[in-house]
Image: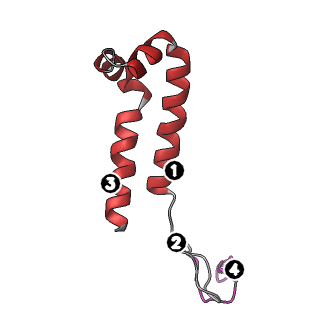
């Protein structure tokens, strides 16, 4: 089910991308909604831009919730031991002193 939702948001992001409005608005020109969007193009650009970013957020923003006692994922040089301590202390090499 998760893949279907992600695919839906991906298709919606593709269709609502502001750079595609030059193609989409003339295709909708025969409808009453299309006539409204062509008449108020600045409103259409704003609406589709917001819809585009919202669909991107829904497509990429969903993350699995963390279980209790689990630390956030850490990048290179960090450890996730589940104690809330994520970073390894910075160590210097003092052998050459």
Query: Where residue 5 sits: x, y (%)?
Result: 37, 59
Q: Residue at x 38, y 22 (%)?
A: 21
Density class for disc 2 (Cα within 10 Å; few <14, some 14-19, many ≥20) is few
Q: Are marks 3 and 1 in contact (CB under 8 Å)?
A: no
Nearest to N terminus: mark 2 or mark 1: 1
- 36 left or right of 30? right
Q: CA distance from mark 3 to mark 4?
A: 41 Å
Ranked by sequence position, the earlier of labels 1 and 4 is 1
Q: Which mark is residue 57?
A: 1
Residue picked out by circle 3: 7
Region rendered in magenta: 75-97
First-in-chain label (2 vs 4): 2
Please identify the residue farthest to the top as the structure is shown: 39
Using a 10 Å C-alpha cutoff, classify the residue at mark 1 as few (fewer than 14 neighbours), some (14 to 19) or many (20 or more).
few
- Nearer mark to the viewer, of 2 and 4: 2
Q: Mark 3 or mark 4: which is in front?
A: 3
Q: Name which residue lies at 34% across and 19% down.
A: 31
């Amino acid at each position: 089910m998760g893949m279907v939702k992600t695919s839906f948001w991906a298709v919606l992001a593709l269709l609502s991308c502001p750079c595609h409005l030059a193609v989409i608005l003339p295709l909708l020109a025969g409808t009453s909604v299309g006539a409204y969007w062509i008449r108020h193009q600045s409103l259409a650009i704003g609406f589709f831009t917001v819809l585009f970013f919202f669909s991107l957020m829904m497509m990429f923003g969903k993350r699995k919730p963390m279980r209790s006692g689990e630390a956030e994922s850490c990048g290179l040089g960090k450890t996730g031991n589940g104690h809330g301590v994520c970073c390894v202390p910075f160590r210097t090499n003092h052998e050459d002193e």
